[in-house]
Image (cartoon, rainbow, N blue to C red):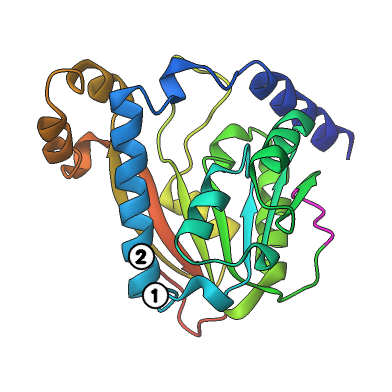
Amino acid sequence: MDSLLSEEDRIKAVYAGRTADDIRYSAFNSAHLLAVQQLHAEILALLHRRGHADLRSQTILDVGCGRGELLRRLLDWGARPANVVGIDLLPERIAEAKALSPADLRLVCGSARQLDLPSASFDLVFQLTVFTSILERRLKQEIAAEMMRVLRPDGLIVWYDYYFNNPRNPNVRGVGKREISELFPGCAIVLRRITLAPPLARALAPYSTLLCQVLGRVAPLCTHYLGSIQKHHSSPTIV
């Protein structure tokens, strides 16, 4: 237990130093804006393919919701605030999310390894770049188990994360297909590569957004998996 608490403290310290005005994650950064726009388009397409396009009645959880950017986007796409929950470790991020979000959207500061939420209560569970920030394998396992616990039998986990290590950042570790399948055993997992490698995108985006969009469809140049995870399938698969 102590090792898990220490790992959560490490994560808090790392992300407490990332401010909201960091230009790398600003909408005024053309490379970041392109990546976010592509991600949103891909998420919408994924939800449509998996039969979750009508968000009005869907119950939704965002694990590692940060300042609530995805949650507010989901509201734009039709989700109802009362059906949406976000959880994050950092109190300052939850405070900012509350200031920017509707009052009836539930935002919780706490650990995703112990969700104070009923079992089988969510149609959709999102995690965007959470698992690569966790270096302790057991913490990943406990969070994955909680995500599965609160997911309805016909629900969907939406996964978006790096699949390789960043040699310049020791605080993240890529999560590949094999590890994802081990974290979510017995599930049907469908993954595809998206998001042009950030160093390449940052170099090219100021000159040609079109070139970035084209290269962003070349799988070997992409750095993230976007995918869906569905549970209780008789024949577990990973694609």
The residue indicated by pointer 1 is 50
Q: Are marks 2 and 1 in contact (CB under 8 Å)?
A: yes
Residue 80 picture quarter = bottom right
Tell me the CA gap for discs 2 and 1: 6 Å
The residue indicated by pointer 2 is 46
Outermost residue on the right side: it is 2
- Which residue is painted at 59% across and 33% down in the image? 133
Q: Which residues are magenta?
A: 112-116
Give the dominant element type of the magenta stretch: helix, strand or loop: loop
In depth, the one of 160 and 68 nearer the eye is: 68
Image location (x, y in percent) of residue 43? 38, 57
- Which residue is painted at 31% across and 64% down in the image? 45
Image location (x, y in percent) of residue 26? 43, 24
Image location (x, y in percent) of residue 38? 29, 45
Left or right: residue 11 compared with residue 196: right
In depth, the one of 167 and 119 nearer the eye is: 119
- Which residue is painted at 59% across and 56% down in the image? 183
Kind of residue at badge 1: Arg
Q: Is residue 235 above or below residue 196?
A: below
